[in-house]
Image: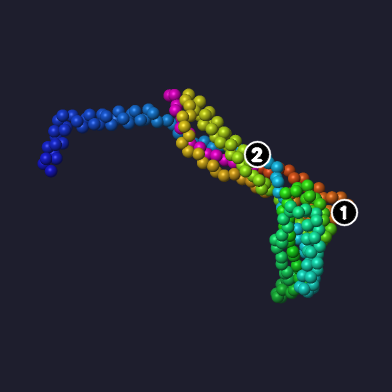
Amino acid sequence: MKRLIMLIGMLATFGVSTIIFGQGTQQTTRDDSKRGTRVMVSGDSLIQAQPDTAVVVLSVVTQAKRAIDAQQENATKSQAVLNALKSAAGTGAEIKTSGYSVEPQRVYKEGQPPTITGYEARNSVTVTTSDLTRLGAVIDAAATAGVNDIGGITFTLRQDRPARDKALSEATREAMSKAQVIAQALGGRVVRIVEVQEEGFQRPPQPVYRGVEAMVARDKATPVEVGSLDISSRVQLIAEIEPNL
């Protein structure tokens, strides 16, 4: 312990501690002069793309006093609907049963237990097709065959990679542009990108209509306007700026 105290005293006498401190201060100052300013910016983009797939939900609903009667009537009409859909939608469409139920219809009166007055059978079919020109014919054929409830039509983009890449590219360019504007305002330049994060994209499906009123069981064909889908992307990046201050 005494030797340690003596060694420290000797170093202090020769000024070594002052030299070490001075070197450390000079190194820190040199690093600070090289260190740039970091800014966090974000870029957003919104592009429109034409959908390539449509999904329509069609239902046959029947009612009867007895459950078996509602079920059998529904089975007959549903088979006719399936046959009509296969012909109208073409070979490339996907047709599948998406729901089936037979439920009692109840009447509620105050102070009394519910009374079953009949039964309702529902058979729902989902049609997915990439031939958007056939949608009107599909709806008309289904309505003629026995469909009396349309859950709605939804357009989506199955082959979405090109649209996603475009949205991501535009969002990245916008973020870079913001960083460069900030650098120019400081009289400097962007020296490097420290970090980049993609905050995902949104491709919401586009519903067209819902309800039985959309069906046309008359001489005119059902018009369907496809429209476009909005695809958005967001990119956040951290840029290092070397200011000229």
Indicate whether residue 13 is drawn in magenta.
no
Pointer 2 residue? 47
**Relative depth, front residue between 109 and 105:** 105
Query: Does residue 62 appear in this view?
Result: no
Outermost residue toward the bottom? 112
Q: Which residue is mark 1?
A: 218
- Helix or strand or loop: what does disc 2 sit on? strand
Q: Residue at x 16, y 29 (%)?
A: 14
Q: Amino acid at mark 1?
A: Arg
The residue positioned farthest toward the right in the image shown? 219
Range of magenta residues: 231-245
The residue nearer to you, when weighing 91 against 243, is: 91
Which image quarter is the C terminus in?
Answer: top left
Classify 10 Å Cα crowding around label 2: few (below 14), some (14-19), many (20 and above). some
The mark that comes first in sequence, 1 or 2, is: 2
Query: Which amino acid lies under the numbered mark 2 shown in the image of this protein?
Result: Ile
58 to 131, vertically: above or below: below
How far separated are the C-alphas under marks 1 and 2? Answer: 38 Å
